[in-house]
Each structure stands twice: as structure tokens, then as C-alpha cells.
Image (spheres, rainbow, N blue to C red):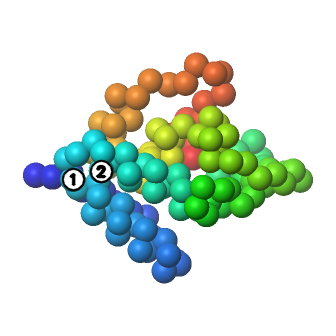
Amino acid sequence: MKPSIQIRAVKSDDEKQLCEIIREAWNYQCYSRKKHVIDAIVNHILLEYAMEQSYMRVAVQGDRILGLLMGRNEESYSRRQVMRYWPKRILLSIYLRGTQVGRRYLKKQPHGKSGRSTPVAEL
């Protein structure tokens, strides 16, 4: 049986459409397709985090991040800079956590050694 992906409830039509693309692409047993899935999440999804009593909101459109709000700081980062701070493992886990596929995927990924890794369970 092919692994399937469970998508959380979303409100906007754009997110619904993207979630369908992610679900469809993830069902392919092909690394290149899965890489596109990860890139789609990085490039188009709105991620919301609560961390260290500050709320960060990262809005991604195309290859540019529109804004990163953390406390009172507001900055704009390129996709490359974002990938440095938010590993693909973390971004993908948002959609895979709680699923068997997600648990298998996350077990294979080593934790970052930078000293500031965000536990998946706390996202």
C-alpha cells in the first residue's frame, strides 16, 4: 500500500490547492517527486510558530519570504537564508507528523548540531 499524507485543516483556497498537490506528489515512490514536495512546502506554505514566548510568522511567496516577525523585529530573508535556520526536516515534519510516513522519515534524519534545533513535537 502506498503511504498517504494527512493534511491539517486549512482555510484559504491557495493552501487547499497546495495541500492537494502535496498529497498527490507524496504518494509517488520517487525521490525527485518528494524533493519537489519539500520545495513546494518551503516556497509556498505559510508557517506559524510559537517559540520562546514570541510568535514568529513566516510568509513565503515564490522564492522570497515576505516577512519574519519575532517580537518587534521585522526582517525579510531569502530562501537560502531560511533554509539555514529551518531545515527541510522541520518544514516537512509539519505535514508528516502523526503519520507513519512522517515518523519513519523523521527517524532517518539526524538532528542538527548547531545547538539550536527545534523539537518537532513542540512546533
Q: Residue furthest right?
A: 72
Across and down, in percent, residue 113 comes to: 58, 19
Residue beneath the point at 30% across and 45% down: 32
Q: Amino acid at mark 1?
A: Tyr
Across and down, in percent, residue 5 comes to: 30, 57
Across and down, in percent, residue 123 comes to: 57, 47
Residue beneath the point at 62% across and 47% down: 79
Q: Is residue 4 left or right of residue 42?
A: left
Q: Is residue 56 left or right of residue 24?
A: right
The residue closer to the viewer here, 82 or 52, is 82
Vertical arrangement, residue 64 with respect to residue 122, above or below:
below
Residue beneath the point at 64% across and 37% down: 85
* First of labels 1, 2 by sequence position: 1
The residue that mark 2 highlights is 33
**Marks 1 and 2: CB-CB under 8 Å?**
yes
Q: Residue furthest left?
A: 1
Vertical arrangement, residue 18 with respect to residue 99, above or below:
below
Across and down, in percent, residue 92 comes to: 44, 47
- What's the distance in space between the residues labelled 1 and 2, CA to CA? 7 Å
Q: Amino acid at mark 2?
A: Arg
The residue that mark 1 highlights is 28
Q: Is residue 31 left or right of residue 120?
A: left
**Label 2 SS:** helix
Visible in this render: residue 94?
no
Which quarter of the figure has residue 67?
bottom right
